Image (spheres, helix red, strand yellow):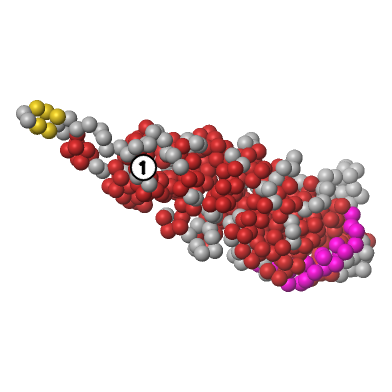
Amino acid sequence: MENRLKSYKNSSRNVDDIRSRRNDVTIELRKSKKDDQMNKRRNIDINATSPLKENNSPASPTIGLYSSLEEIITHMRCNDSTLVHRATQAARKMLSQERNPPIDNLIYHGIVPICVGFLESESPDLQFEAAWALTNIASGTSDQTIQVAKAGAIPKFVNLLKSKSLNVAEQSVWALGNIAGDGSSTRDEVLKHNTAEVLLEILQEEQPLSFLRNIVWLMSNLCRNKNPAPPADKVKLMLPALARFLLHFDTQILTDAAWAISYVTDEDSDRIQAVIDTGCVPHLVKLLDHIENSIVVPALRSVGNIVTGNDHQTDTVIGAGALKHMRKLLKSPRNNIVKEAAWTISNITAGNPSQINHVLQEGLFDDIRDVLVGGEFRSQKEAAWVITNVTSSGSEEQVFYLIEKVNILKPFCELMASRDARCVLVILSGLKNLLALTEKKGHLERFQELFQEVGGIDLLEKLQEHENQEVYENVTQLIDKYFNDGDDEAENLAPKDVNGALEFNSDNTKPNGFAKFNF
């Protein structure tokens, strides 16, 4: 843990350590953003009903024409263009049902290669129905999505992006978005067919809002997923357009563009720098104050990712005024926003004293203390990292400021009662730094008194029974080094026989000025 703290952020430190922590946080945060942005979407027709055995329904002329799925497939394979279109539309309607579409059943009956073949039809109407059906199949499980990709749909969809039929082009974007959103392999397959280049060509002309929304959503999925990350050259190709979309008026476009930037910045410093070079950081910072949380969350994630980079990259975020928004974010009613705001600040306090000073000047340590006192536990853990990083990277004055002015010690130490071993280790690391510093400055005894006053001694003693071996070892080391002097104290306090009388040793061992930490 000590090594981890020493190598937490700067370029001279171990990048793998911070990336490990960043990935842990990202995984937790992704779990909480399911409602904010989806990587796959079905194209639902609210009027769609099953074309099978619904003779009395007036919803569509196709209803009631088919007695079985086999009959639909048979008509899709016939030579009568009218029957083919009608049957394809019927299959599409089955896949457009809001609940439990029979995707596997339709795949079993061979609909995927049939619809992929229809993508090269001369009829835009048939292309549209086939593309819609494949879009909804690709919105399902990974196995279902892969069936569409394996059937050769990707290059055909890319060719249709510039179709004269806007419906066909838009549906093709939607289908590619579902395929790309399935994972790294299908994403790279979509990119391999020059999808990014074609999209940028399309964007050179003004497009309808609905089409534009789907394009930005597809671009965000092309930047999404890791292990491996998308090819850097393809990502950097899209960045200028994504940066411009951060200035758009539409909420959905802003949301997806911000998510795309967050995916790109969730990588190495080179990609972070590529984002900074687009000049979009001030726009991301401005979005931190947006009224829509669906936009605030990815903007905050992006800013948080950028400050995991080197000092220059962190300074870019600070210079854009990001810290001015953090107080509001730390008081958000949404726990995931509070957590990520604290995480962002923790990456700044892992930097250098100058960067920590910006946090101090904004008065954010008081808000961090409030999170430690009453925040949701995951936010408290991030707030604990804020403090521990200051004890590791801050100046002596800044550390003493936290103790004396912010009164951080009590809520910081109380987290040692947590059952979360990783959280406890963070606290113990910070405590070890505090003890070493106060010992160095000759204030150790006063700090020990303060530590005892806030209940720290009792909490340390309880941790000696902790089930985690690393916690146990750290606690033992601290107690042995800083709190295991009871015998010496007893010897010093014992009365001495002086000329036949008992004389008690007065407490004159405290250095002067220990009432406060003066700096």
Q: What residue range appears in magenta?
A: 181-208
Q: Residues within 10 Å of mark 1 (few under 14, many from 20)?
A: many
Q: Is residue 330 visible?
A: yes
Residue ID for mark 1: 443
Three-letter residue code for mark 1? His
Image: 470 above or below 126: above
- Asked where in the image residue 85 lies, by quadrant, the reply is bottom right
- Asked where in the image residue 216 lies, by quadrant, the reply is bottom right
Q: Is residue 106 visible?
A: no
Based on the picture, tell me whether residue 235 belongs to the magenta stretch: no
Based on the picture, tell me whether residue 203 belongs to the magenta stretch: yes
**The N terminus: image quadrant:** bottom left
Q: Residue at x 88, y 42 (%)?
A: 56
**In terms of secondary structure, where does tag 1 sit?**
loop
Residue 14 placement (x, y as % from top left): 49, 63
Residue 144 placement (x, y as % from top left): 69, 60
**Depth order, front residue of 177/7:** 7
Tag count in the figure?
A: 1
- Asked where in the image residue 116 lies, by quadrant, the reply is bottom right
Q: Residue at x 22, y 38 (%)?
A: 489
Residue 412 placement (x, y as % from top left): 46, 39
**Depth order, front residue of 286/68:** 286
Outermost residue to the left: 500
**Depth order, front residue of 297/136:** 297
Residue 358 placement (x, y as % from top left): 60, 47
Q: Residue at x 70, y 57 (%)?
A: 261
Outermost residue to the top: 501
Looking at the image, residue 47 sits to the left or right of residue 503; the answer is: right
